[in-house]
Image (tube, rainbow, N blue to C red):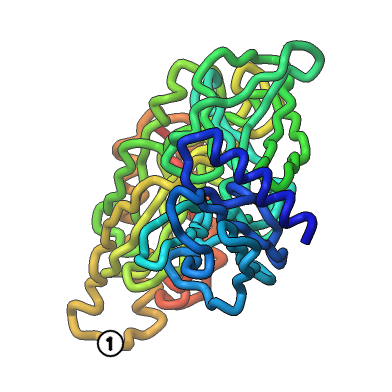
């Protein structure tokens, strides 16, 4: 009781020395989830109000009178046990009202948890001059009160600590460093999380800008038929324009799926070619194809870069089978092999006619098909069932 009387006397002096006619104490406290709070509303005698006529609300909801205590004619307290996390990061509104509903004074309650150590910090550069980093909040990720995340970085062996300033990337827990980055020397990068209840720091990652270069997806992806070959499609794409001025060797991957499927099949060994032929596809079928790029060895870096996003899906269909169009639903194996050999003979006749003087890649391609044909004793349907290969043009 002595404590309450001292509080009332102190508050009364504050009110008498200012223009305030009412106040709630404590003002804007920060509390852990599960804590209890006793707040006091003190009114000036000039208002002519007795505290027995006052009431409290929390976020607009009237609190039960059983939680009130009249400390004096001008001081009324309320006790809130086992508080839950704040409903909004800007705080919960605890308000003292007169009997007529007028707002006398209020306080914001910040009820939450201190931040946990941020995790999964990763960074990438799109042109060797900038850097984008993203991370995830630690633990459950929800602190219930406003938590500030600050990305910091410095050169590993010298230089002063700097803070990333551009958090307006459209994605949470992301920051963009647009300029003034050094090459050929590692950086230390970390994230600090702070709120009214505490602070936490992520693990420090060490990276060289040249080792985390990525790029936009390959441009101008085109998928087309290969003449009348019913089981093949040709894929071509352009080098990502953002890296056209850099010395590097790109690696590419292709993935494709059937029109009515959600399962992508990935070809991981396309190499640094910018064209590829898919073989063993189903006839008369629509395929969706995507390509992505990994810039390797920029300015002599020995580490692989970061895979780009996949390009937008490009669709193309394989030709319909002539046998199916003729009404033969179950051709014999001999007919299938005969048709396959005829198609291959036509294909290689075209290669011999149009590829005069090309390098050994054409001969290698020819030999691969010959060996494959000689070893294949499968029917046409078996060949077309998920037997995918990639052949590069000799151009």
Image quarter (top left, top right, bottom left or bottom right) of the N terminus = bottom right
Q: Is residue 177 left or right of residue 37?
A: left
Up the image or down, 115 lies above or below 322; here it is: above
Between residue 225 and residue 59, name the one nearer to us.
59
Q: Which of the image's four quarters has the C terminus? A: top left
In the displayed structure, would residue 162 be above or below residue 90? above
With respect to residue 35, does 336 lie above or below? below
Q: Is residue 231 visible?
A: yes
Residue 346 coordinates in the image, percent (x, y): 30, 54
User: Is 146 on the left or on the right of 366, as rendered?
Assistant: right
Label 1 crowding class (10 Å Cα cut-off): few <14, some 14-19, many 20+? Answer: few
For the point 55% across and 38% down, which residue is it? 16
Q: Residue furthest bottom?
A: 330
Q: Looking at the picture, how far across and down is residue 43, in whole percent?
A: 52, 52
Image coords of residue 33 (percent x, y): 68, 63
Viewer-nearest residue: 311 or 2: 2
Q: Secondary structure at mark 1?
A: loop
* Residue at 41% from the left image edge and 77% from the top image edge: 381
Q: Quadrant of residue 78?
A: bottom right
Residue that numbered label 1 is attached to: 329
Q: Which percent across, then down, holds residue 144?
A: 59, 57
Q: Residue furthest left?
A: 326
Foreground: 29 or 363?
29
Give me the residue at 41% from left, 30% from top: 239
Q: Residue at x 69, y 53 (%)?
A: 138
- Who is closer to the viewer here, 102 or 130? 102
298, above or below 362, in the image: above
């Amino acid at each position: 009781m002595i404590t309450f009387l001292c509080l009332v006397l102190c508050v009364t002096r504050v009110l008498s020395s200012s223009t305030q006619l009412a106040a709630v104490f404590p003002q804007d406290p920060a509390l852990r989830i599960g804590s209890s709070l006793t707040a006091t509303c003190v009114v000036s005698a000039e208002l002519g109000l007795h505290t027995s006529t006052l009431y409290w609300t929390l976020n607009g909801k009237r609190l039960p009178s059983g939680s009130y205590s009249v400390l004096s004619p001008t001081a009324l307290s309320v006790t809130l046990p086992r508080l839950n996390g704040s409903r909004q990061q800007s705080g919960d509104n605890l308000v003292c009202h007169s009997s007529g509903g007028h707002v006398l004074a209020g306080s914001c309650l910040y009820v939450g948890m201190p931040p946990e150590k941020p995790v999964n910090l990763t960074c990438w550069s799109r042109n060797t001059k900038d850097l984008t980093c993203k991370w995830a909040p630690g633990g459950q990720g929800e602190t219930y009160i406003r938590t500030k995340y600050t990305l910091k970085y410095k050169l590993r062996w010298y230089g002063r600590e700097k803070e990333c300033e551009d958090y307006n990337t459209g994605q949470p827990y992301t920051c963009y460093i647009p300029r003034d980055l050094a090459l050929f020397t590692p950086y230390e990068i970390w994230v600090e999380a702070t709120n009214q209840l505490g602070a936490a720091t992520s693990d420090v990652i060490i990276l060289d800008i040249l080792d985390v270069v990525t790029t936009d997806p390959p441009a101008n992806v085109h998928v087309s038929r290969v003449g009348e070959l019913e089981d093949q499609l040709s894929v071509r794409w352009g080098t990502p324009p953002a890296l056209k001025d850099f010395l590097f060797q790109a690696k590419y991957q292709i993935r494709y799926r059937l029109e009515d499927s959600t399962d992508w099949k990935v070809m991981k060994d396309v190499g640094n070619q910018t064209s590829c032929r898919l073989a063993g596809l189903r006839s008369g079928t629509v395929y969706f194809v995507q390509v992505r790029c990994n810039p390797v060895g920029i300015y002599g870096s020995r580490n692989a870069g970061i895979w780009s996003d996949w390009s937008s899906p490009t669709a193309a269909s394989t030709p319909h089978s002539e046998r199916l169009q003729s009404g033969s639903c179950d051709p014999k194996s001999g007919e299938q092999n005969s048709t396959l050999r005829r198609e291959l003979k036509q294909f290689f006749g075209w290669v011999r006619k149009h590829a005069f003087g090309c390098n050994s890649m054409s001969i290698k391609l020819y030999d691969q098909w010959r060996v494959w044909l000689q070893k294949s004793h499968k029917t046409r349907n078996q060949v077309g069932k998920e037997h995918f290969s990639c052949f590069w043009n000799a151009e």
